[in-house]
Structure formats: C-alpha cells, structure tokens
Amino acid sequence: MDSYLPKPFHAGLSAAPSRRVGGGSAAANHPAPAGDQSKESPPAVLDPRYVAELCSLGEGSGIDLMSELAQVFARDTPVRLDHLKNALHQGDASLLRAVAHTLKGTASGVGATKATAVCARLEAAAGDGDMESAGVLVAEAEDELGRVGGALESLAFAPRVVS
Amino acid sequence: MNSATPAAILVAEDDAQHALLIRAALKAAGLVNPILVFDEGGQALAYLEGEGIYAERRLYPLPVMGLFDLHLTDMSGLDVMRGMREQRGLGHVPAVVLTASEDPVDIDRAFTAGANSYLIKPVGFEALLEVVRNLGLYWVLTGDVTPEQL
C-alpha cells in the first residue's frame, strides 16, 4: 500500500510514557543548567513538548537520544555554519539557500522553533537573491543555533528523573 | 522470533541527526532487525550488490525494507532505491523515500521511481510506524504481532 505523509511530524514522536527531565516537566523549556531555577526563565530555545517527546522516544528506543543529538549537533552545526558564511561571502545564493535548508531541518529535528524560523527566512531570502537580508539572517541564525547547542548540551547532561 | 539473523533495514541517509531519529523511531517501534545506515549512496549500493566484504550475507543480510534520503551527498536516493530494486530478490522490497521537501514534483518523482511511501523529515515515531504498518511489515519486523492484530 502506498502512502504519503504530508507534513513534518513534530507531534506524535512519543513511544513510551513521558518522563521528566532536569527535575521537572518544565525543565525541558530551560536552556540553562538544571540547577539554575531561581532566575526568570528565558524564552524557550527548544519546544518543551517536542523535547519531552524526544526524551520519550529515547526511552522507548533504549538510545540516549538527547546526548546523541547534542553530540551530533555540536559536531555538524559549526561546519554547516561555516558553509553558510562562506556562501554568503562568495555571494552564492544557491548554496546559501541549500545550506539554510539543511540547517532548517537540523533545527526542526530538535524542536528549535525560533532557529527553524530564522533558517526558513534565510532560505527564502537566499531564494529571492536578497543577500542584504541574508547577511542579517546568517548572523541571527548563528546566534540562535548557538543557543540551541547550549540548550541541547544542558539537556544532555541534566539529571533525569523517571516519573 | 527465530534464531536466524533477522533481515536488515537499510537506511541511506547522509544527515546524522536524521539517521539517529530514524534509528530511534525504528527501535521504539519494537523492530529487532539490524539497522544499517549508509551516509553515501555508493556505499549503500555496494552493500546491496554484495561487493567486497558485503558478499558474506550471513554477516551482511539483505534488507527487508529500505529508507532512502532523496538527496544524498553523492547521488540521488532514488538511484539507490532503483539499485535495490534491480537486485535479484529485492524487486519487491518496500522502499520509503525520506525528504525535507514537500514539493509535489519531488513526491511525484519518488512514486514514479517506485517508492511505496514518502516521509517528510524529521521523521517521527508515529509516522514511521504508520508506514511500517501500511506496508504490512510490522509483524515481519517485530516477530511478535500477527497481521490480525494490526
């Protein structure tokens, strides 16, 4: 039977009952280390519902998914950002669009909502040949993806509490 | 589940993050088969064709399902899928195309090339499980659920 599933599946990742991460269900919303709960929460870098689903998926699969995702992100994203900046400096809108598209997928895969949106805007700007806007968005993407890396690292090394 | 080496699931995916999510989703679905991830289409084709070390099928079993990223670094995932289909005994192995594109042209190309299913990345557990069910593979892959239970 042929099938076509027409949109990203950010919901419905769950394979097992959810578990709390970082000492509470809201901790997935905190890019700061788990122990730093006295300060006001910064805006969510990662979608907490999506992160909870990733944690559940990791639990259901027996894979330390958050740690592995953090490692892959830390390894691959700086390289892609370099490609992004090189494409910008070379004025290569086509390459810029392609790398932005890849980074959009990377951000989406970890539930980084804002980074996904920034990369989507960058992809669109590059597609339109608007290199001036693209320059601004490359810097924005680099900043936001840096925050995503920090948030993933915090989650990867946060203490985990089974509900 | 018998004691023989279970058939493999071949994944041709050059994005490590997506490959990781696919592997997790397959494992979480209860699939016990070896999951072989190739980040280059050429490697995947060498495996499918039994080249070199891959000739030893006891160690490198043929796939019972293939998942193919549409845009691999070295070639199109559709070419790898076609390569699988051309192998003796693999002509009817279910093939799922993975892509971040929702472009109807890409979707049409995938089905025209013989894909059984098409998944938008990042691939979630429920979506992947639905595909496995739709392809009638769940009981084959897990070995503990009959088709009637689906």
Image (tube, coloured by chain):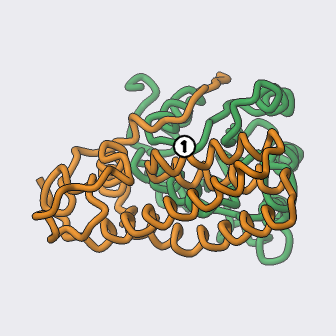
The residue at the point 60 percent across, 43 percent down is B121
Quadrant of the snapshot with the N terminus of chain A: top right
Left or right of residue B40, residue A54 in this image? left
Left or right of residue B65, residue B46 in this image? right
Q: Most extreme residue toward the front, as rendered?
A: A132
- Would residue B89 be seen by someone viewing this image from the given angle? no
Q: Which of B87 and B23 is in front in this view?
A: B23
Q: Which of B21 and A87 is in front in this view?
A: A87
- Would residue A142 be seen by someone viewing this image from the given angle? yes
Chain ID, orange in image: A
Residue at disc 1, secondary structure: helix
Left or right of residue A83, residue B86 in this image? right
Q: Nearer the viewer, residue B124 or A130?
A: A130
Chain ID, green in image: B
| Label 1 environment density (alpha carbons within 10 Å; few <14, some 14–19, many ≥20) | some
The residue at the point 87 percent across, 58 percent down is A92
Number of numbered tags placed on the structure image: 1
Picture coordinates of residue A138 (x, y %)? Answer: 65, 58
The residue at the point 38 percent across, 25 percent down is B149
Residue at numbered disc 1: A117
The residue at the point 82 percent across, 56 percent down is A95
Task: In the rendered view, tell whether residue B24 sits above or below residue A9.
Answer: below
Picture coordinates of residue B70 (x, y %)? Answer: 76, 45
> Which chain does tag 1 point to?
A
Q: Please name the amino acid that badge 1 sits on.
A: Ala
Picture coordinates of residue A162 (x, y %)? Answer: 14, 58
- Quadrant in the picture for residue A62: bottom left
Picture coordinates of residue A115 (x, y %)? Answer: 51, 51
